[in-house]
Amino acid sequence: MSDLAIFQLTDEHKMLRDAARDFAQNEIAPIAARFDESGEFPHETIKKMGALGFMGIEVPEEYGGAGMDTLAYVLALEEISKADAAHGVIMSVNNSLYAYGLIKFGTDAQKKKFLTPIASGKSVGAYSLTEPMSGSDAGNMKSRATKDGDFYVLNGRKSWVTSGPVADYTVVFMVTDPQKKQKGISAFMVDSKTPGFIRGKKEPKLGIRASATSELLFENCRVPAENLIGSEGDGFKIAMTVLDAGRIGIGAQALGIAEAAYEAARQYAGEREAFGQPIGAFQGTAFKIADMKTRIEASRLLIYNAALSKERSKKTGERFSLEASMAKLFASETAMFCAHQAVQIHGGMGYSKELPVERYFRDAKITEIYEGTSEIQRMVISRSELGLK
Ligand code: CAA
């Protein structure tokens, strides 16, 4: 990868990126195919990533995190995802969908209790918004939280929860006032040991198979009222703000997949010969390499720009939705493009499980779907540009 001329990385950024790269290539890349095949959750490597500070990069040091910025986060996440996108999404959800909301909206007591264990990698965090009948239309959820003295009683069914089968703590969004639609949604921290918190069916997935995804069921699950994040009715805005951060993470994950596919394709194009010359000497292959490289660099610019916009927002409070959606949209479509081209350049070998290229192809697809489909990103971008929201 190149260092982009217009973005100045500090020595600290470079050290973190190099540490992530070494760890990813030495400890994750060699096991990625095995965990993809078995669909087993990689507990050991996730714990090690916690010890290295990768599971809470932006979490302040007083809560056990690395206390670094969003650029540091995307640099490390790209390297991890280049070795294995499943490790990448576990890291991304922990850092952004889970931790960012607590950092931004949590009380000091909530941060101490719910941030500290996940920043160290000892515990895993999850985010639960989607329901069987409300995915893209997140505001249409039906799960209910009803106040009962010093508790909220949670009932409902959530789906597609990344790390759902293993998470120790989950931020859960439920309706507290059905009359108010989006303004009647609230956010709660739920400890998985709470009675009535039930892990549902684990999803058998096409890609990112080592990251566990499941339904979560809530049956009269009594959560202390002190676990409410912000005030009643703040939930939808919290969910959306946190998703803006999450989308930068998925952009970085997609960039890692794109890079891995590109590197494999570039190498193969130089080695494999046909009709008496390396296939890279044919324009049909060479132009694919050119397009992959260009889209990867454009993705990186958009992701770094979104990361810096999020940093700026810490001071100004301004939203960075537009930058995050553009980065996620372009990087995820680039990951799919590059994985597709890499399979094509490899021919039959691209279709074989002997090489990781087919895994990149399967892993890339989800980046166009979760944390807002490409269609939702285009909706956010166009609404912003047309002044409709
Ligand atoms: N930041 C802050 N506030 C926001 C916001 C944002 N990014 N987006 C919207 N809001 C606010 C609006 O300003 C509005 O507030 P006011 O009424 O006070 O003006 C309120 O929220 C409602 O906004 P909209 O009318 O725009 O809401 P909508 O119902 O039209 O939905 C949407 C907008 C962008 C389509 C949204 O529903 C959305 O992002 N959908 C996709 C959901 C998604 O990404 N799901 C993925 C879940 S996580 C996952 O994938 C699994 C995993 O574990 C990885």
Image (spheres, helix red, strand yellow):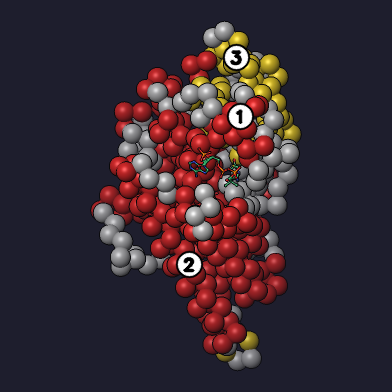
**Could you tell me the amino acid type at mark 3?**
Lys
- Of residues 145 and 302, the one nearer the viewer is 145
Q: Which residue in the protein does label 2 denote?
A: 296
C-alpha gap between disc 1 and disc 3: 16 Å
Sequence-first tag of 1 and 3: 3
Question: In x, y percent, where is residue 161?
Answer: 63, 37
User: Residue at left 59%, top 49%?
Assistant: 372
Ligand 1 within 8 Å of disc 2? The answer is no
Q: Is 293 drawn above or below residue 276 in the view shown?
A: above
Closer to the eye: label 1 or 3: 1
* Element under disc 2: helix
**Is residue 53 at all visible to an observer of this figure?**
no
Which mark, by number, is residue 147?
3
Sequence-first tag of 3 and 2: 3
Left/right of residue 18 with respect to residue 47 in the rendered view: left
| Quadrant of the picture in which ligand 1 is shown | top right
- For the N terminus, the quadrant is bottom left
Q: Which residue in the protein does label 1 denote?
A: 180
Q: Is 289 drawn above or below residue 197 in the view shown?
A: below
Sequence-first tag of 2 and 1: 1
Q: Is 23 drawn above or below residue 235 in the view shown?
A: below
Label 3 Cα crowd, 10 Å radius (few <14 / some 14-19 / many 20+): some
**Could you tell me the amino acid type at mark 1?**
Lys
* Element under disc 3: strand
